[in-house]
Image: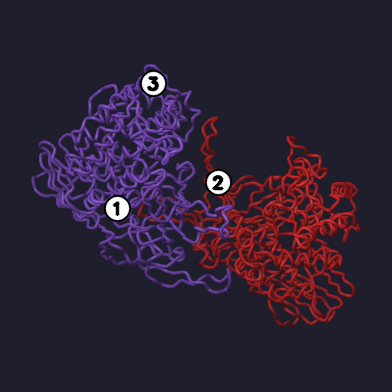
Chain colours: A red, B purple
Amino acid sequence: MKIFDRAEVKLTSGYLFDKQELNRRITVDAVYDRFFDTGRIEAFKLGWKEGGENKPHIFWDSDVAKWMEGAAYILSEHPDAELEARIDAIVADVKRGQHSDGYFNIYFTVVEPDGHFTNRDRHELYCAGHLMEAAVALDKYCHKGELLECMDKYADCIYKAFISEKTAKFSTPGHEEIELALVRMYCHTGKKKYLEMAEYFINTRGAVDEQMKGSYDQSHLPVREQSEVVGHAVRAMYLYTGMAKLAKETGDKALFEACKRLWADATEKKMYVTGGLGSTYIGEAFTSAYDMPNDTAYTETCASIGLMFFANAMLALENDAKYADVIERAMYNGMMSGLSLDGKAFFYENPLEISLSEHFSLEGAGRTFKVMKRKLPITERVEVFKCSCCPPNIVRLFPSFGEYIYGCEGDTLYVNQFVSSQLSSGDVGCVMTADYPRSGSISITPEGVKRVAIRIPSWCKSFGLNKPYREEKGYAVVECDGSEIALTLDMTPRAVWADPRVRRDAGRLCIMRGPVVYCAEGVDNGENLHRFSIDADFGWTEKENEAFGLPTLEIDAYELKSTGDGLYTSSAPTKEKTRLTLIPYNCFANRGESDMLVWLRQN
Amino acid sequence: MKIFDRAEVKLTSGYLFDKQELNRRITVDAVYDRFFDTGRIEAFKLGWKEGGENKPHIFWDSDVAKWMEGAAYILSEHPDAELEARIDAIVADVKRGQHSDGYFNIYFTVVEPDGHFTNRDRHELYCAGHLMEAAVALDKYCHKGELLECMDKYADCIYKAFISEKTAKFSTPGHEEIELALVRMYCHTGKKKYLEMAEYFINTRGAVDEQMKGSYDQSHLPVREQSEVVGHAVRAMYLYTGMAKLAKETGDKALFEACKRLWADATEKKMYVTGGLGSTYIGEAFTSAYDMPNDTAYTETCASIGLMFFANAMLALENDAKYADVIERAMYNGMMSGLSLDGKAFFYENPLEISLSEHFSLEGAGRTFKVMKRKLPITERVEVFKCSCCPPNIVRLFPSFGEYIYGCEGDTLYVNQFVSSQLSSGDVGCVMTADYPRSGSISITPEGVKRVAIRIPSWCKSFGLNKPYREEKGYAVVECDGSEIALTLDMTPRAVWADPRVRRDAGRLCIMRGPVVYCAEGVDNGENLHRFSIDADFGWTEKENEAFGLPTLEIDAYELKSTGDGLYTSSAPTKEKTRLTLIPYNCFANRGESDMLVWLRQN
């Protein structure tokens, strides 16, 4: 399907709208301020000298570029002189700092000036890709073409170094991203060279002389021969997104087939219930099928964002609601948990279990010979990271929610997500009213199409629709008669099980309400949440919660009590009836450090 | 109670006897051979020069000393010219290499010759302690006094450096061991200076100027103020053993009270069901109460051995069967698992869960930029470690099983462990016949005492005794009438639960038969053992197994089956009845690398 552009879709109210507003009012500035404090903004002036403060890192260009991309989206809808000045200043720095051959990179200008295109693992092309995405955003939505001009020159420089003259010391980027950026450059400008470059990097990846680079960055096989998602999860998602976007433009069937296999492996064997990807912090990587430890889950915010990119690119290739289902899963859970409720702080890792007593540190009074802390994710969000890719990824994703809602194919309008919004694209339009996911009542009034295909979420076993419909790949297809279509999704909290091959979740269940995963926190229920178990058909009550923007649940549960017989005993522990408070997973750790558990033991 | 000496107790048949024989026939030579290969034996010649092969490590003296101690025990009962020559050669090396001031240490002679007693964390006193233990063993049981003479001189050197002249740059050892060794030296020779030295090191530990050393090596508080077991588990056990042995000799009540508190903390809050200690590989250390992850359990073989030392020292101070219960738990489980069935290979870590698919390694073909392996224990025993403390600890423990069986107090003979054996100590004697733990039938015929106190294991809820008895601190006390006492312990396999505060075991149970913990292995049951669950009152059958020396169990179980509905679904997985094969935990990983699980999900 054709996915409608963000400029054609306006969110009007509701949960995601509130998050967009939070991002516009708070997050975009909070991220800028931290980037300013840490020297990332100043770094664009290329004034750093050996021995100076704030030595630029290899990925700082990309941090700020992602911020600029998000800021451009915000600016395009909400004039803001200060924000505009900040963007313009950075663009001016890039223009001023760009080498005569078109090259631009902070680190390889001030730290290793002789190292242009010599080290595959130093994020040069990754940074270039993000700058290109920012350039497209500024030109397309803000009519600011300067950065695009710079990036066009930089693209020529890259073309020479990698394709026509092959002076670069490597063939493909160690961290993918430029592939999808180049397709975006092509789609925006229509210039074939960008498509050629995207094809070059994708087709060269994993070629024979590249395979020694290993599976960490998906270079172990030519991409069309890949079937298993491996290695660094964010790298993987960016590559697959680039592949899918390229396949859409070129009609490359083998590439599309590879994308389908990789999609299936990721979402059917390696995806957490929250839409999190990456089971280990070592390499921030995928491990083996069904290996999803909850306490040491890596599940980087950027990986869930990357999964949304990949899913939307797949949806553009194939009208199957399963892609939109995964977007919804990541959006309301493992991606959204990346941002604090106040909009200022971020998780890089999004674990599904915290036991504070395991965050044990053994240090001598004043002695630091060894930090005795087990490697576990942090337990509270922070404002900036040394490797701070996630915060600006949120800044650019939130104003883009509009790109996930509608699509069309011929005379059919596709409704992929439920958000109060207005679509307006030529003759085609739609007004949707949905206080989702707080409520399951959705009203859709399309215009200029013959039929509407409305996604029926795979989690929903019971729904009401006020029109006749036929089912097609997860969509309920309704013939338009000019009147409002009313859909009601059953939002009753329900038990969800993982495939029994997911060993860490065996004998456990999690509670979902609509698309929202719930969790128990120590702050409500006391420490050591493993002592609770619940029935599959648990009793429950809902409570509104303004701070969370989603209801909390009180559910019937059982609590294990010690028999007092000692550490190990042949008397079974007793079980007492109790109530357990659950909150939306994406809100965890907003009330201080606390134990947390998603997968509860089944009684 | 007075614990009877190993020389007074002879094992005559049965499970532990077979293990002793395995150690004598295989293990003692296997460990020597590996120590020879790795240069540990040669190192005693002090010929290493910078740039040479096999650079001595700081703990090599102790590795070989422990081997010598074990070899001395074996030699004392089984003349063996080759073994004797090996011991004699090492002793001759020590004698020849000893400095004129009595000092002896390989590393600080050939690698850092100017560093004597300057670095608290370099195991000098730890090595000295093990050499002293070997010296006592050789003199007491083999009438070979040369090493004892050397160590007496070395003790004088240490006395000067640490006590009378205080030339040493630190006050107490970074790795405890010498404390218990000095008490053994005192008990064997009667020389007060050894007791004084033991007291000095124990009393100085954690004194104000030591507290900065931290809890990693139990220096955070004066030992009499310590109540929580912390830090490196083996260090902790050796210290507490030294404290208890000292308290026994001096009658120091405050020290005994500290030992009791530490005992309670270790065994009631931090001990695995296998008698394993140490929850994390980071620092090989204790963490917080009830924190006992099964897959990343550290549970070093030496820590379980140290727990047996500590328990026996406590039993000498207090006639309470709980100490002997813990000895039994460690002996048949987490200690015994340290040795392979063929007697040649060893575990350092003894985890309670292995999922091979989590031992994931992501490497590029030929590229080694990063080993992507999560830190998990090894899955098969090996013949020697770089830090190879566990193998020779087994070599010296196995010939000492006799020291754990009998004790006496006044006219009462205590039977602490059940082993076919003969006790002969002056007028006091005992003949015990027990094919334990294969069978629960035990025959005891005492001599020269008025009563016998027989431990009734705390795991045993049903037993038969052919005499009237009264219960006293876990013992059944029987008045002697000259005839055989017949005890029958119920060896029915049973479910065992952990206190619900042990979060990793919540909702799970393990199967024990007598003192033996059982586990499921993938080699019998297929991978992903988490798919099984069992009822608390499971049906079972027993099968003899010669290789294991203990029966295996087949038990009724349930197996979760995928509904095929996808990775996450609101259809509960189905359960099918099946049978599960369990083997004694201490035999795991003897048939190749395999999944393994102790704590099974309760149905």
Q: Chain of mark 3?
A: B
Residue B398 x, y percent position in the rendering: 26, 46
Asked which quadrant contains residue A299, the reply is bottom right
Q: Amino acid at mark 1?
A: Gly
- Which residue position holds label 2? A356
What amino acid type is highlighted by mark number 2? Leu
Counting residues from the N terminus, which is met first, the one under dot 3 or under dot 1? 3
Q: Residue furthest top?
A: B165
Residue that mark 3 sits on: B161
Regarding mark 1 in the picture, which secondary structure is present there?
loop
Q: At 87% across and 47% down in the image, what residue appears?
A: A96
Can I make out residue A15 in this image? no
User: Eyeballing the image, is B228 above or below B339?
Assistant: above
| Of A154 and B545, the residue lying toward us | A154
In this rendering, the label closer to the viewer, 3 or 2: 3
Which x, y percent locates residue B311?
A: 31, 40
**Mark 2 closeness class: few <14, some 14–19, many ≥20 residues within 10 Å:** some
Type of amino acid under label 3: Ala
Question: How far is mark 3 from mark 1, CA to CA?
Answer: 41 Å
Residue that numbered label 1 is attached to: B343
What subunit carries mark 1? B
Q: Is residue A239 above or below residue B211?
A: below
Classify mark 2: helix, strand or loop: helix
